[in-house]
Structure formats: structure tokens, C-alpha cells
Amino acid sequence: MRRLTPYLLALPGWLWLAIFLVVPMAAMASVSLQTGNAYDGYAMTFSFSNYADAIGRYSTQMVRSILYGGLATAAMLVIGYPVAYWIAFKGGTRKSVYLFLLLLPFFVSFVLRTIAWNFLLSDNGILFGTLKGWGLLPADFHVLATTLAVVGGLTYNFLPFMILPIYVSLERVDPRIVEAAQDLYATRAAAFRRVVLPLSLPGVFAGVLMTFVPATADPLNAQILGGTGNTMIGNIIQTEYLTNLDYPTASALSFTLMAVLLVGIFAYARALGTENVLEAAAR
Amino acid sequence: MRGTRLGDRLLHIYTWIIIVWLSSPIAVMILFGFNDKQSKSNTSWQGFTLRWYAELFDIPDLTVALRNSLVVAAASTVITVVIGTMLGLALGRHRFRGQGLTNFLVFAALSTPELVMGASLLSLFVSGNVPRDATTIIISHVLFSLSFVVVTVRARIVTLDPSLEEAARDLGATAWGTFRQVTLPSIMPGVLAGAMLSFALSIDDYVVTSFVNGSTVTFPLWIVGAVKTGIPPQVNVMGTLIFGVGVLIAVGNAVAARRRR
């Protein structure tokens, strides 16, 4: 009985993951190779051309998603690193208060936060409407339905996921090591570049993973903040699945997206020279 | 030295600017729940009112959506906590065959983009002719919350000294008695953290739910559907109340943890 314990404990969770994570992937793989239409149903024909068709049709949105995801991730890194740095080294006894304040937006639903930005940025809303009223902005000035709005929304929504892992890795850096570097005549800039930055790279790595993947695959920011020229692959997959009922195209696009993200992650890991990808990612 | 102090002070101000930026949509949401709007759209400030708090449940569809969200979040949290704690215990406390694979599945569930998770679940349900309703939503929410409970419980159990459990057994406690009186109390903070996280993830989810909901509408789905016609102030009020309760629980939790220490 004792020996069976771990299996009995693991069984329900394991089954859940197998049935609802692994089997659906197989189902999606199967659907992505079928042909037919929404009314007569789809049948398996092993038509790998579904992939070529889907990618050919939506390469613009695929490339745009990766570009937007990449831009947002870069912005989050630039914006978030100094915050993580300051809290880790200068936050003193109030560190947890600052972290709590950074996490405050998560007590409001993702959908509502994004809509609040749509509201704040609207062409004649409280912000731009007022500035236009004062003559500080031209009347046709607008941010909604532009690349800036979508990338800004993504940056806003996922920023804490970038700050937290960087903070965790910086918090582990012993300030005495930095002092030692300065005692050995390193300038502050050199001490940062040669000591602090390398020690924080695992956090940067984890932060980029935690933000790039969801930002690239997110449909909501483009839907709420973007215009017709900002459609991302997430919107296409949603429309193909839910409106057009074109399951094979949607499945093929989903798989392509996942493959692109996986390749991106591993290429990035190699470029960074991280030896323990999974260890860094698991943190 | 003076130059470095100036740099630190600038970073301090910068950190506060980022905090204000992150919080500004919250302020807007709360404020416009008190807006005495006269026209259809709720986009400009027209005076203070508590009307929307009094008329909170006057939009039947919205009320149903909120109730659906709460039911789904409660049900999926209960399931997730039970099976997630069991799996966390198995992975943190025991060695068994297939452990590596199980760890991989937990990691895979954490790192699969929500969009792909939703799309693949819909593929499964469509292939199996499973009708989409609250049940399929709950199934999906358990899936994306499960790994978070496993991770928090496992992190807690590995800090627990196994000799405590051995001592309980040596003193004649049954396996169940040991679990209830020794193991469970000490992993409880991890279990609770996992439960709160599951509930929050579930009530907030839009992407996965949008694939598997069928005709059942949840709070986030209702809001996205209402964007084109204008978000009624009741949504702001509900968001404000959810925000308030969440912050109260988090602060209360932190205070209680500090007092225990």
C-alpha cells in the first residue's frame, strides 16, 4: 500500500494533464491535417498543404505578432530593469510594499485594465480631449488603432512579469560583491556591467520568457486597442475557430505559432549562452 | 558620492512613476463607477453619484455573467486544490516511476500559451462532439491553474522536515492521521496561496474561456462583448468590488503572516 501511495496521489492530476493537455494537442494535430467545410464536417486527408495555405494567407499577421511581441518585450526590459534594480538594492525595509504596489493591477481583471486604456487613450477622451481643448494637440491626433497603442498595451499588461524575476535575481546579489568591485577601483558603471548585470541574467532570461510568449500570442490588446491594420495572429486564430469555423486552418496556425515560439526560445537561449534553459525558465 | 545619491533619487522617482502608470487604469475604473453619466456612453465626467452601486444588478445578462464567473471560479478552485495538492505531495515527497514525465507535463501546462491551450481544447471538444458549456469552462480552468497549485505546494513540502512525519508514525499515528495532523497544517500556506491564485486566474480568464464557453458567458467575456456598445458603469462597480475584496484578502493575509512570525 505504502508503495502505491505516490501513484494514487499523482493519478488524478496526471490524468487531467494527459487528457486535457496532451490529448487536445493530438486532436489539434489531427484537425490541422483535415479537409472539408463547416457544414459537411471535416475528414482526415493528411493534407499538409493546410500549413502552407494558412501560413501563406496569414504571414503578415504572424510576422506582425512576433514583431509586436518582441518590441513589447524589449520595452518591458528597458522600463522594468531599473525598477527591479532600485527595489532590490535601495528598497530597504519597504521592498514588499513596492512589490505589492507593482502587483496591484493584477487585482483588476486583464480585460478591464485593457479597456481602461482604450478609454484613457480615446481620441476625444479625458486625456487627449482635454489637451486638444487647450490647443496643445492637433485635432486629428490619435493613439488608438496604432502600433504604439497595441505595443504599449502589451507592455503595460505584462510588465510586472518582467520586473519580478529580475528583482528576484538582483535581490540575491550580495551588495558586498559590488562594494568589493568598487574597492578594486571599478567605476560604478563598470561594477554594474561586469558584476551586477551578469548575475541578473537568469532573471532577465526568465522575464523575457514569461512576457514574450504571452505577449506574442495575445489577442485582446490588438482587439481592444488596435485598428484593422494591427490584427495579430491571436485574433486570426480566434476568428478562424469561432467565427469561420475553419478548424483546420486555425489548428495549423496554432501549431505554427507554437513552433515559432519554441524555436525563438531556444535560439534566444543559445544566443544568451544560458546552459540551463529549463532551470532558468522554471524559476 | 553626491552624484550617486542623485542617481538613486532619480531612480526612486522613476519607480514611483512606473507604479502610478501601472495603477492609473485602476483609478479610472473606480472613478467612473461613481460617474453620474446622462448619455449612453460613460466617457466623460459628469458628476458624482452612488446610483450604479444601488443599481448594481439591474442588467440581467451581466449579473448572470458575474454569477457564472463566480461559480466557475469556485468549482475549478476546489477541484484544482484537491488534485493539485495531491500531485504536489507526490512530486515533492515521493520518488516514483514517471516522475520526470509528470514534472515535464506540469512545466508544459505552465508554459503553453493560453491561446494554444484554448485552441487545442476546442479541437478536442469539437472532435469528440462535446457540447461546450460551464463544464468545459471548468475543465479548462482546472488545467491552467493546476500547475500553479502543484508548484506552490511542492515548494512548501520540500521545506518540511520528513522526520516530523516519521515521528508521528512512530508514535502510532495512521497514515491519514499523520497527513491530517502533521503534513496538512504545515503545507497549508502553500495550499491557500495556490487556491487564491487559482480563483484569481479563473475569474480573470478571457482567452481560454473564449474558445470553450459555447453559449455560457462569463464576466470577462461579457465585458469584451459590450465594448462596441459601451461598457455600463455597473461593470466598473463590479470591478471595483472585486479589486477591493482581493486587496483586503492580500493585505489581511500579509498582516496575519507577519503576526505569526
Image (tube, rainbow, N blue to C red):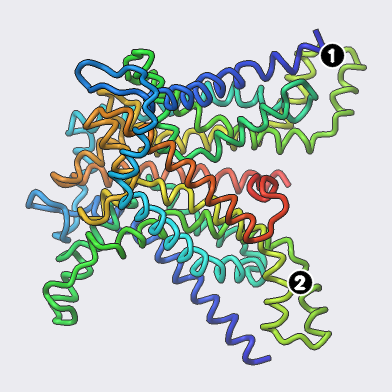
Q: Which residue occupies 14% across, 81% down?
A: A135
User: What is the three-letter code of the residue carrying label 1?
Assistant: Ala
Q: Which residue occupies 45% across, 67% down?
A: B18
Can the viewer see residue A29 in this picture? yes
Residue of label 2: A175
User: What is the three-letter code of the residue carrying label 2?
Assistant: Pro
Residue of label 1: B173
Q: Of helix, strand and loop, which one carries label 2?
A: helix
Instruction: Tell me where residue A50 sits by quadrant.
Output: top left
Q: In which quarter of the image is the N terminus of chain A?
A: top right
Q: Which residue occupies 68% across, 47% down?
A: B259
Determine whether A37 is above or below A96 in the image: above
- Mark 2 nearby-residue class (10 Å; few <14, some 14–19, many ≥20): few
* Left-right relation of A178 to A227: right
The mark found on residue B149 in the picture is none
* Left-right relation of B81 to A169: left
- Give me the chain letter of mark 2: A
- The percent position of residue B114, horizontal first and vertical second, equals 44, 38
- The percent position of residue A15, horizontal first and vertical second, equals 58, 17
